[in-house]
Amino acid sequence: MKSKKTLFIILGVLILILAGFFYFRYNFVLGEGVKAGELNYVVKKGYIFKTYEGKLIQSGIRSKQTGNIQSNEFEFSVEDKAIAEKMMLNSGKVFELRYKEYIGALPWRGYSPFVVYEIISIK
């Protein structure tokens, strides 16, 4: 009787640790921010979970070698269909996007740990 109680306590603690790990890994917001740049593309893709994935090309930054310009790419996922469709209609324009950064990506949320949830401006 006492060994069953101990087993249930250990099992309960393990379940709580696993739940905490999964929450921290996939639902904890590591960072929030704004990125600006020219929208390269937004596509809907996936085998089982169809998600919206996109790429933003940020303005060039001088590299350490003289005469070279390096561009930064920001790859992201979009959960909201309305936001993704608005971005698809305005591809090639300059966007300011508000995003959340997670530690890990979930298949139904997208391939990227960066998830865009708001469009600030389109120019």
Image (cartoon, rainbow, N blue to C red):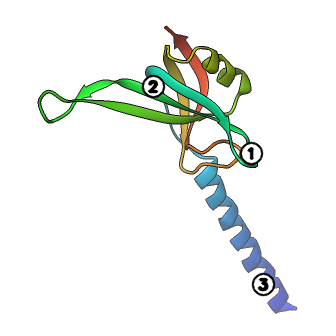
Q: Secondary structure at mark 3?
A: helix
| Circle nearer the N terminus (3, 2) | 3
**Badge 3 local density, few (<14 within 10 Å), some, or many (20+)?**
few
Q: Position of residue 54 (x, y in %)?
A: 56, 32
Above/below status of 29 relative to 92: below
Task: Give the CA separation, mark 1 to mark 2.
Answer: 26 Å
Along the viewing direction, whichever of 49 and 9 lies nearer the viewer: 49
Front label number (1 vs 3): 1
Residue 30 horizontal side relative to residue 118, left or right: left
| Circle nearer the N terminus (1, 3) | 3
On the image, which quarter does residue 60 sit in? top left
Q: Secondary structure at mark 1?
A: loop
Quadrant containing the N terminus in the rendered view:
bottom right
Residue 73 horizontal side relative to residue 121, left or right: left
On the image, which quarter does residue 37 sit in? top left
Q: Which residue is mark 2?
A: 35
Q: Position of residue 12 (x, y in %)?
A: 76, 72
> Residue type at mark 2?
Lys
Q: Residue at x 49, y 8 (%)?
A: 123
Q: Residue at x 65, y 17 (%)?
A: 86
Residue 53 horizontal side relative to residue 95, left or right: right
Along the viewing direction, whichever of 119 and 84 lies nearer the viewer: 84
Residue farthest to the left? 66
Q: Which residue is mark 1?
A: 49
On the image, which quarter does residue 79 sit in? top right
Q: Residue at x 57, y 51 (%)?
A: 104
Q: Position of residue 66 (x, y in %)?
A: 11, 30
Task: Give the CA separation, mark 1 to mark 3.
Answer: 38 Å
Along the viewing direction, whichever of 77 and 10 lies nearer the viewer: 77
Front label number (1 vs 2): 1
Q: Which residue is mark 3?
A: 7
Q: Position of residue 14 (x, y in %)?
A: 69, 73
